[in-house]
Amino acid sequence: MNASYSTDAQFIHPSILNADFMRIGEELDRIGTADSVHVDVMDNHFVPNLTFGPSMVEQIVERSPIPVDAHLMIADADRQAPVFAEAGASSVTFHAEAAAAPVRLARELRRKNTAAGIALRPATAVEPLLDVIGEFDMLLIMTVEPGFGGQSFLESMLAKVRRARAAISEANLQVSIQVDGGVSRETIERAAEAGANVFVAGSAIYRAQDAAAEISALRELAAAHSAH
Ligand code: DX5
Ligand code: ZN
């Protein structure tokens, strides 16, 4: 599936980084009403944490009732990202800081029928990317330093979201903007107003008693405050 997300709709992607890994099947079922499951791949090099490899992602793809959105926090994205497309992820997002040839890599992912995303750490500027942003299906603006769940949303990233959305609209492109880190009922409205349309939430959803209720609450807040 070439999951180019419609920029006219809001998408909720729970992050399983905050799930109970001993019960991963049930944890995937808990979020079955979400749009995609966000899988944080970390290599203990690009970030100081270690999570899933391609064979685990392949098993998650097989088991998950919804598509898999892989967020690669790994070095050497050029060589590694295609492996995650082959593992069956519907979208693969790699970090701009870790890719030598991001446009070539995005084209390779799209040739494999996978949506291509590019991610920016909080201190990475979006401007150098804007001339090539049409090569991607999604821009991920990190709203925490990548590496761990449960951190606080960086309000200062809203200006970056706004500038990116303005440039994408001006160029008449259909590129989604994803925000990841500290997204909750308290922060999702401002992210939606700024122009984000894909929302990753880890602890907000997995710490809720009723994950499905939390997913619909987040979706409704995002829709009510959408920049469109
Ligand atoms: C952080 C990850 C996020 C994280 C989000 O490096 O990319 O996806 O799991 O978790 P919360 O929503 O708890 O900030
Ligand atoms: Zn993530």
Image: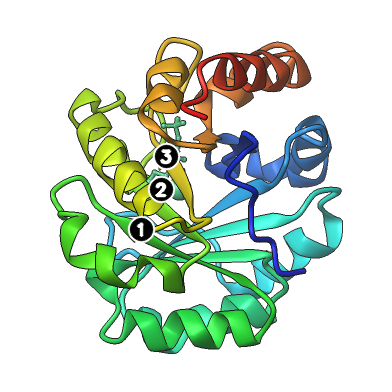
Residue flagged by tag 3: what amino acid is it? Asp
Residue 136, percent from left and from top: 46, 68
- Residue on which disc 1 sits: 119
Estimate how packed mark 2 is, as few (under 14), some (14 to 19) or many (20 or more) residues with alpha carbons within 10 Å. Answer: few
* Colour style of the rendered protein structure: rainbow
Estimate how packed mark 1 is, as few (under 14), some (14 to 19) or many (20 or more) residues with alpha carbons within 10 Å. Answer: many
Query: Quick check: 110 left or right of 62?
Result: left
Q: Work out which quarter of the rendered image holds the N terminus and state it.
A: bottom right
Kindly indicate whether the residue at mark 2 contacts the one at mark 1 (C-beta within 8 angstroms).
no
Residue 144 seen from this side? no
Secondary structure of the residue carrying tag 2 is: helix
Q: Which mark is residue 180?
A: 3
Secondary structure of the residue carrying tag 3 is: strand
Q: Residue at x 71, y 69 (%)?
A: 2
Which tag, 3 or 2, sits closer to the chain's start?
2
Q: Residue at x 35, y 58 (%)?
A: 119
Q: Which mark is residue 169?
A: 2
Q: Which mark is residue 152?
A: none
CB of residue at label 3: within 8 Å of ligand 2? Answer: yes
Estimate how packed mark 3 is, as few (under 14), some (14 to 19) or many (20 or more) residues with alpha carbons within 10 Å. Answer: many
Kindly indicate whether the residue at mark 1 contacts the one at mark 3 (C-beta within 8 angstroms).
yes
* CA–CA distance in space, label 3 to label 1: 10 Å
CB of residue at label 1: within 8 Å of ligand 2? Answer: yes
Which tag, 3 or 1, sits closer to the chain's start?
1
Is 158 above or below relative to 6?
A: above
